[in-house]
Image (spheres, rainbow, N blue to C red):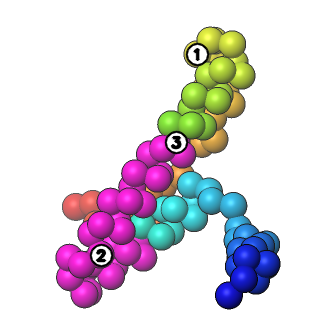
Amino acid sequence: MGWDTIRAAVCAILAIMQPVSAQRIENAIRIVARLIDVDGDGYWPILERLEAEHAALANREERLARYLAGGRPQAARRLLPKPARSMPREDRAPHE
């Protein structure tokens, strides 16, 4: 396989990829958690990687908001997106 073929394949893959968002990572975490629940611990490394990526994304967003706000904490909070729920309501344990 030549470099032109490889380059074309990579470009095709990148063209259909969606940007990574906190919501997409959270959805993936839920899916992997269910896989672990059903199929065992073999998926733990994937879950840990997704958690690390989610934390890194949140850290980048927080830092960017802080820099854009010029060190003003109130302004930085307004720039940050509202935190999404980590689990849909139906997956939570009922309150008794």
Name the residue carrying label 3. 58
Of residues 96 and 42, the one nearer the viewer is 42
Q: Going from the N terminus, do you reach mark 2 or mark 1 first?
A: 2
Dot 1, crowdedness within 10 Å: few (<14), some or many (≥20)?
few
Label 2 environment density (alpha carbons within 10 Å; few <14, some 14–19, many ≥20): some
Q: Amino acid at mark 3?
A: Ala
- Verify CB contact (< 8 Å) between mark 1 and mark 3: no
Label number found at residue 86: none
Main SS type for the magenta part? helix
Can the viewer see residue 69 in this picture? yes
x then y, percent, for residue 17: 70, 71
Quarter of the view holding residue 38: bottom left
Q: Quadrant of the N terminus?
A: bottom right
Give the secondary structure at mark 3. Answer: helix
Q: Is residue 54 magenta?
A: yes
Dot 1 corresponds to which residue? 73
Quickly name the residue at label 2: 43
Q: Pointer 3: residues within 10 angstroms few (<14), some, or many (20+)?
A: some
Element assignment for label 1: helix
